[in-house]
Image (tube, grey):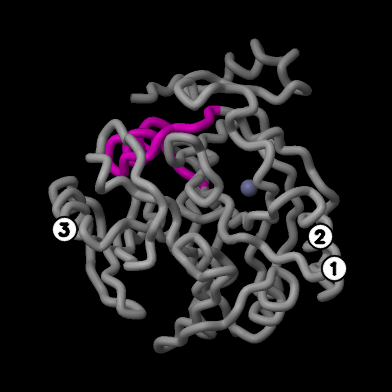
Amino acid sequence: MQSKVKGIHHITAIAGDHQTNVNFYTRLLGLKMVKQTINFDDPQTYHLYYGDSAGNPGTILTFFPWGKNGFKGRRGNGQVTTISFSILSSSFDFWMNRLKEAKVNSLNEVIRFGSRVILFEDPDEIEIEIIADENEARPAWDSKFVPQEHSIRGFHSISLTEISLSDTEQLIVNSLGFTKTLTEDNRTRFTAGNGKPGKIIDIIEAPDSLYGRMGVGAVHHAAFRAEDENAQLNIRFQVINENIEATEVIDRKYFKSIYFREPGNVLFEVATDPPGFLVDEDENELGTSLQLPPWLEPKRNAIEAVLPEISVP
Ligand code: ZN
């Protein structure tokens, strides 16, 4: 039987200054730092994870901060160009006012597929949205900086910008199990499972726009949820069946991962839900100290010596 992804697992982007990134996502958006670790492929760079209180899949936004002088990226074709969070409809005014007061960049409001959408940019010019979707049903959680009832519930969706829809559509439908559901202008919506927030990909067809460039302010990849290792292997097989090269399974400590580039050039990952972020810290300790995978623990002193200090509120 075909295995399907369960929705978005995490999204990873490149940030500039470390502390600016921490302050924006914790103090302003109210997310919790759920893991401080390093880029396992580049141990001199932090890997910071934000999410809900328990670090549930579908709430996890992660960053590789390249520092104030990091190479600047550009949003464009072949990338995830917007990260969308989800809130209750009753929280729309709260968030609009909060973002206005914070004077975030490029603040705007649109109606899309019948839902109210707040658009803005983070300090590195990553396009962020907060969408009030009446189908949002994930529980509120106790954020330090935002009243519980208004907490961001997790991702709503990702938007990809592509030269053309058809090849990407074929991959995400045939090998990931998404269904094409709605179209508005040059935006086509695909949903997994029951199609609720957290299980949505929008593809924006923009044949004339420039290709994106990886760097500060660009999204590095999007990861989708596999129920377990068995489902992940099935999905890997389905991807390869579409003539796409996929990596072997890689151990990321908090999940197992495979990576591949979809035909429009966006880097996709399929990550397992288990074991999750509570594997090395309790829920109340999440994100409070630097965690290293066992194979890098012997180098802790050298690693800590080159990482800039960050203060997590
Ligand atoms: Zn990832």
Image quadrant in which you'd find residue 242:
bottom right
Q: Which residue is mark 1?
A: 240
Is residue 21 in the magenta section?
yes
Is residue 209 in the magenta section?
no
Q: Residue at x 31, y 44 (%)?
A: 29
Q: CA distance from mark 3 to mark 1?
A: 45 Å
Image quadrant in which you'd find residue 77:
bottom right
Q: Residues within 10 Å of mark 1 (few under 14, many from 20)?
A: some
Q: Is residue 31 left or right of residue 206?
A: left
Q: Residue at x 64, y 80 (%)?
A: 169
Q: CA distance from mark 2 to mark 1?
A: 7 Å
Mark 1 secondary-structure assignment:
helix
Task: Inspect the image, locate mark 1, and give the three-letter code of the amino acid beneath it.
Answer: Ile
Task: Find the magenta span and give its range.
Answer: 14-36
Image position, residue 212 (x, y; %): 54, 65
Q: Which residue is mark 3?
A: 93
Task: Inspect the image, locate mark 3, and give the three-letter code of the amino acid beneath it.
Answer: Asp
Q: Is residue 210 visible?
A: no
Q: Residue at x 83, y 56 (%)?
A: 233
Q: Which residue is mark 2?
A: 246
